[in-house]
Each structure stands twice: as C-alpha cells, then as structure tokens.
Amino acid sequence: MKPLALYVHWPFCRRICPYCDFNVKRWRNQDTEAIAKALLADLQQEATWRGDHWRLEALHFGGGTPSMMPPEVLQQVIACAKDLFPVAGNLEIALEANPEDVDNFPAIAEAGVQRLTLGIQAFDAIRLQQLGRQHSPEQALKAIKTARDLFPSVAVDMIYATPHQSVSAWQDELSQVTRLPIDHLSLYGLTIEAGTAFGHRPPQGLPDNDLDSALMLLSRDIAAEAGFQQYEVSNFARRGHQSRYNSMVWQSCDYIGIGPGAHGRHHVSGQRFAVRKLPAPKAWQEAVMTDTETKNLRGLESFETLDAVAAVQEWLLMGLRLCQGIDLENLPDFLPANRQALVQSIQQYQQTHPNIWAFDGRFISITDSAALRLDYWLAELCIAIEI
Ligand SMILES: C[S@@+](CC[C@H](N)C(=O)[O-])C[C@H]1O[C@@H](n2cnc3c(N)ncnc32)[C@H](O)[C@@H]1O
Ligand code: SF4
C-alpha cells in the first residue's frame, strides 16, 4: 500500500487579514449542513476515483479558519475518511486554529484531532494590529496553554519582517515564544501578495533585503538554541513533531484535496496529475452535489496532466525545501523514463557547485549559507540541468 494524505479546505474566516491570499471568504452564516454534505460527497468521489492500494497517513484541516467548523462536521469528515481508506496506525490528524476559537478546542480534540497549529503570528500588540489580527497577546497565550492540555502536538505560526520591526524586538519576541510549551514553529517572513489589502496599499516601513535576511538568520539561531530542529525553510520542530502532512507534500507523495479551491496531486500509471477544485464555495458545492452517478471527478477548476518537465520541476522545488533534501536513491514513480540521466546531471551540477548544494552519497540538499537564496538557486539548478 502506498502512503496518501488528505487535505480538507474550510475557506471561511470571521474577517479577512490584509496580507492573506489563501482561498478565503468572510463567514456570513452559510449553511453548514449543506457544506458538510458537499465535503462528504467530495471525499466519497475522490476515494472512488483513487481506488484501492492507498493507506491514509495524514489528514489535515486547513483554511481559512477550520477551528470555526462545527465539531459534528469535523467528526463526520474524520469518520468518513477512516471508513473509505485503510488508515495508518499512527495517522496524523491536524487542524489550523485561530486563538479566538479557544472555546472550540475541547470539541476539536474530542473529534480526534491530535495536532493543533495555532495562528499566533505575533505576540506584540502593535504587530498584531498591523497584521489586522482579531486576537490579543493574552488570548494567544491562553490558546497555547489550553491547546497544551488537550493536544499531543501543538504548533505555532509566526510572521516576521513586519513594518518597523527591529532585530532586537524580534529577538525578544521569538525568545519568549520558544519558552512556551509548544512542539513546532513555523516562521514566515511577511510576503506582500498581489490582490490582498496589503498588495493594494503596501504598509510603510517594511524591512529592506538586508534586514529581512538578518531577521531570518536570527530566527534560525533562536529556534535552534531552544531545541527546535529546522527541517524545512520555514519550519522547526522538536523531535517527533514535524508536520506529517506538509512533509508528505514536500516529498511529492500523493494527496487528495477536498473543499473549495483545494489542490491534489496524484500519480497513476507513471503520470502525475494536478487537480484543483472550484474556489467559489457555492459553485464547488453545487458541482460536487450534481450528477453524483458520474465516474468523473466533479467540482473541478482544473485537472492537468503534468508533462515530464513540470513533474521534475515540482519534485525538485518541493523536495529541496526540506533540509534533508531529495533522496536520489528513492525516486518517485512519476519521474520520466530517463531518470538515471536526470540523477547524473543533478550530481554533476552539485559537484561543480559544492558551496551551494551538498551531497552525502544519497541526499542532495541546499547548504546553510545558500539557503537564504533558495528560490534563486533552485531556478539556476533547473536551468543547468535543462528542465
Ligand atoms: C492558511 S494560513 C492561516 C491559518 C489561520 N487561519 C490563521 O490565520 O492563523 C497559514 C499560515 O500562513 C502564514 N501566512 C499567510 N499569509 C502570509 C503572508 N502573506 N506572509 C507570510 N505568512 C503568511 C501565516 O503564518 C498563517 O498562519
Ligand atoms: S490569515 Fe487566517 S484568519 Fe486571516 S484571512 Fe487568512 S486564513 Fe483567514
């Protein structure tokens, strides 16, 4: 049996944060019963389409704000997934939560979630305000303490490189966070995305490239000193607390995406497919509930067969985000037939750029010093090996 992950997208939020370009919609008392039915229909059709031979290893509720999901909907989706797929003994069930939903945490734990990822983003009241967040530092602290009592794994997301942020202020703030009872840290530099409120009116006082790099290096040092091992560009974990779902995505495993705008990746008979569901909740809901007898997947925005170049590029771009890098002895089935030539050209390129790429006889990875410009070096690698 092959490992499979399942991503469930809950697109609704109380308010839309000015930096966020995920597929999100403001919550307006939508019909949760109808959404639940659509999620179950989406899951059912995907399971039928995927067929046998898959073992579910990770189930991830992302958003949006899935901590707003009615607990009975959460329970139904988890039960349905367990019913439809053989499940790994140590299946990871994770959910992204906002601190405002602290009162829902007991019901979320009761439904079977073991890993809670808290969107804290900042502990400083002014930074929280700049980011348009709805919670206070005190609420953030309460959410962490409550989560600690309920979930075996507690993760925290933070955003740095915000307006007028100094190195010393970030040092104090992040050091404070690492002393909290948490198992995992995601540290993201603020990105200004087109189409968001910040994209339309960028805030004043954003850091320049030098300050941005200094903040990133400092983040790595503070996390390491506090015992969090970096395992991906922006992710740090205590032993045994890496995100299973994210790691499977970075390792190019197959995953199903259900819900509005959810992405999936599949490989069938040596070919790689990229699937995306319709992003508008109503359109997705109507499409998955119509023609339920058909064998084709419903509610799709796109269903793309990745050609060899696109499949190799995605495999490299995802896998080389991991500190461990890419396993050249264990290549995914969907790579092209001339896979040995591909491995050789990657190895040859590494030998001519040992300061950028490291090779330990099996894994190829970015060196620490080059990791600050990962995107640049990835593009160079793809050009050099002619993909
Ligand atoms: C799906 S989002 C948010 C989940 C949750 N609703 C929340 O607000 O905490 C997952 C994470 O991506 C990060 N993120 C989202 N947009 C970002 C941006 N423009 N720049 C940097 N980090 C971002 C945040 O840290 C966030 O917690
Ligand atoms: S950051 Fe989280 S709460 Fe804010 S809009 Fe995005 S998904 Fe919603």
Image: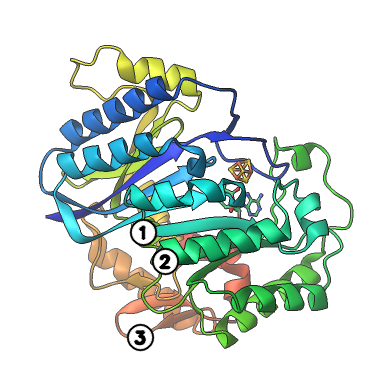
Q: Secondary structure at mark 3?
A: loop
Residue matched to label 3 = 360
Mark pair 1, 3: CA separation = 34 Å
**Dot 3 and dot 2 residues touching (CB under 8 Å):** no
The residue positioned 40% from the left and 59% from the top of the image is 115
**In the image, is residue 109 above or below residue 302?**
below
Residue name at image x 33 percent, y 20 percent:
288
Q: Which quadrant, please, contains the N terminus? A: bottom left
Q: Are marks 1 and 3 in contact (CB under 8 Å)?
A: no
Q: CA distance from mark 3 to mark 2?
A: 31 Å
Q: Give the left or right position of residue 242, taking residue 125 as reference.
A: left
Q: Nearer the viewer, residue 7 or 267?
A: 7
Figure check: 272 above or below 298:
below
Instruction: Give the residue number, with chain letter if any, for mark 2.
Output: 153
Where 303 falls versus 341 (above or below)?
above
The amino acid type, in three-letter code, at marker 1 is Gln
- The answer to whether 26 is drawn above or below residue 375 in the figure is above
Q: Quadrant of residue 162?
A: bottom right
> Where does residue 307 sit, x and y in percent of width and height?
33, 43
Residue 76: % across, % down: 29, 36
Residue appearing at x 57%, y 40% in the figure: 22
Distance from the alpha carbon under mark 1 to that under mark 2 = 6 Å
Residue type beneath disc 2: Ser
- Looking at the rendering, in which quadrant would you find the C terminus? bottom left
Q: Nearer the viewer, residue 126 or 23?
A: 126
- Reading the image, the residue beneath label 1 is 114
User: Which badge, 3 or 2, comes first in the chain's sequence?
Assistant: 2
What amino acid type is highlighted by mark number 3? Asp
* In front of the other: 58 or 322: 58
